[in-house]
Image (cartoon, rainbow, N blue to C red):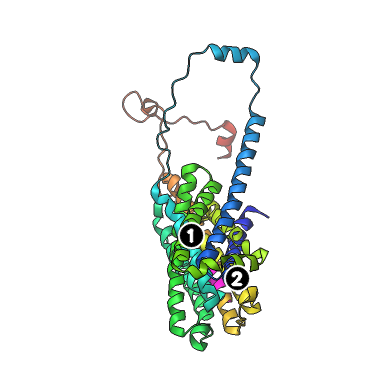
Amino acid sequence: MGPKLALATLPFIAGIGLIVQSGINASLMDSIGHGILAACVSFAGGTLLLFLLYVAQRASEKRKKWATSPVPSRSSADERSEDPPAAPRTPRSGRPGLRLWHLIGGVIGAVFVTILTIVSPLIGFAVVFVTLVLGQLTTSLVFDHVGFAGMPRRPFSKLKAVGAATLLVGAFLTVVQLLVNNDADVGTGTAAVLALLCAFSGTAAPLQTVINSKVGAAIRSPLGAALLSFAVGTLVLLLASIVVCLIDQGVWSGLGDGFQAARWWEYSGGAPGAVYVYLALKLAPTVGIATFFVSLIAGQLSASLVLDHIGAFGFDKRSASALRVAGVLTAFIGVAIIQYARKHDAGLARASSFKGASGKLSGPASTVVEMPVKDKTDAMAPGGGERPRNDDTSDEEKGET
């Protein structure tokens, strides 16, 4: 797989993973009886996975460092022992450090996963992630346009506007069946409120990606930043779970039976979430926040339509009607337009920078380009007039003329 194909495919796979994570967490919620507890278990599993990967990465880096470092000879070791003690290290100027607001990324992730866990069984996977599209797409395009928080600036263009509008039309075609036919486990008004809640959580997803990217730059490790985000989210959900159990004693008493009744795969919801956070950290600064989330959205819509149609994870089937399929296909067209707009705008930017760097030579053909004269006295005759030019024409050429 080439680099360009990987950049386009990996966010798509991450979007599928988010849908699968929601289904796994919702199934676990059905087993243990509470959504916040299910989200906490999911985050704890993701934290454990990222911790093991981080430890393995650090061990691999140390092995490579020891393998490539030269072995000092005894004489050089004796010379170093006679050297005066080195001055204490001073902190490097300009190196970013962790700030308290860097922890917000983990809080956003905890809220995001909890909402999806609770709402997905009620109004369906497709509706949840179509409403997420509204928040994710809007925020990511704005962040790209303004270069939010030091991210590379990618201005909003007319072609991107066409692609975004097409994607939103596809999203509307996918969700309209719920509003018309009331194809949900709750009333239409409640479903609309839950959909708006999902849209609001979607607006925070690009913000989480930007914050986690800053954490990765501060500690110089994207994997470490993902681990920190999951650890914070796990702590927040653990505290919330304790509060829930203190308020409702019935939840606490039934936890043991619920965890025993849960199937083994219901504890794996943290894995796809960890993959998503890590890929967002690695790819979003490279391809742009909007481009990453557009590919992510395509994966979300495709997987949600399929999982709804087959009734995955034991939930009610919601058939993939012609209207829903048309909506997803329309959304794919919007994704393709935005991807093309990114390449088109990048090409224009490169052409503009090349034109600006070429100076006068890039101007109109009628522009006269003055050639520098090495020595001004060589062009003047001794009396102040113009020195006659030397005729270097050969005798044969003179004869021909």
Q: Residues within 10 Å of mark 2 (few under 14, many from 20)?
A: some
Q: Is residue 9 above or below residue 401?
A: below
Q: Residue at x 62, y 32 (%)?
A: 65
Q: Which residue is mark 1?
A: 237
Report the predominant secondary structure element of the magenta stretch.
helix
Q: Which residue is mark 2?
A: 31
Q: Position of residue 77 (x, y in %)?
A: 60, 15
Q: What segment carries the magenta color?
A: 329-335
Query: CB of mark 2 within 8 Å of CB of mark 1?
Result: no
Q: Residue at x 43, y 67 (%)?
A: 247
SS at badge 2: helix
Q: Earlier in the sequence, mark 2 or mark 1?
A: 2
Name the kind of residue labelled 1 in the image: Leu
- In depth, the one of 58 and 218 nearer the eye is 58
Verify whether residue 333 appears in magenta. Answer: yes
Name the kind of residue labelled 2 in the image: Ser
Distance, label 2 to label 1, CA atoms, is 18 Å
Q: Quadrant of the C terminus?
A: top right
